[in-house]
Image (cartoon, rainbow, N blue to C red):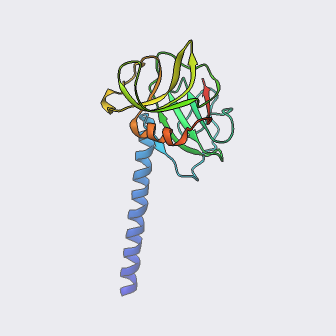
Amino acid sequence: MPGVASATAVAALTTAAFAGVAFLGVQALDSLREGGSVALPPDATETRRHSPGRHEPTVVPPRSGHGKRVVYSVSAQRVWLVRPDGGLLRTFTVTPGAVQPVPGHYQVRSRTGRATGSDGVPVEHVVRFSDADGTPIGFSATVDEDARPGTSGVGGGAIREGRADGEAMWRFAVIDVPVVVVR
């Protein structure tokens, strides 16, 4: 009965494949719950409804504009990189600086590959979009991942990202790309 053995083998492989996909899905969900970042495939646009004022990690906040944009939630300490078609490219948590931007619509004004942050920490992929009383506000990643602060704010208007997230922001947020700040 070679046909039965083949069918059994195919069924076992299929079951193993489904188990592997389920395992990876649970890991990704756990990463989001722990504040990690997730890069989503182009067809993973999420359209679920959610309660006002609460920003779910995989849902672009409502009333945050249209088209390609960076969305930053001050209260959730989270960033969404939104593709031109409105789909979610990537989302990740950030550590806000002492000076926060006022909710509103901005554009990327300037970019610097490497610099020293106002707290003396070497940073890279600096993307500035606003200022408050002469203090520049923008996203940056620390060169030394261990230097990234935990839950406390960093100096000035720095909104700190992990290195991989900073690289993604750098590739995405070129001059004049909209940045929408929401509560």
Q: Residue at x 60, y 37 (%)?
A: 60
Q: Position of residue 15 (x, y in %)?
A: 41, 65
Q: Which of the pair 16/127 is nearer the observer?
A: 127
Q: Residue at x 57, y 52 (%)?
A: 42
Choose top left, top right, bottom left or bottom right for residue 162: top left
User: Is residue 119 toward the left or the right of residue 43 in the image?
Assistant: left
User: Is residue 40 toward the left or the right of residue 9 in the image?
Assistant: right
Quadrant, the C terminus: top right
Q: Is residue 73 above or below residue 1?
A: above
Q: Position of residue 133 (x, y in %)?
A: 56, 12
Q: Is residue 80 above or below residue 52?
A: below
Q: Position of residue 56 (x, y in %)?
A: 55, 35
Q: Which of the pair 85/27 is nearer the observer?
A: 85
Q: Is residue 123 above or below residue 101?
A: below
Q: Which of the pair 71/139 is nearer the observer?
A: 139
User: Is residue 109 toward the left or the right of residue 19 in the image?
Assistant: right
Choose top left, top right, bottom left or bottom right for residue 65: top right
Q: Residue furthest top?
A: 133
Q: Residue at x 45, y 43 (%)?
A: 29
Quadrant, the N terminus: bottom left
Q: Is residue 56 above or below residue 29?
A: above
Q: Residue furthest bottom?
A: 1
Q: Position of residue 109 (x, y in %)?
A: 58, 29
The number of callouts visible is 0
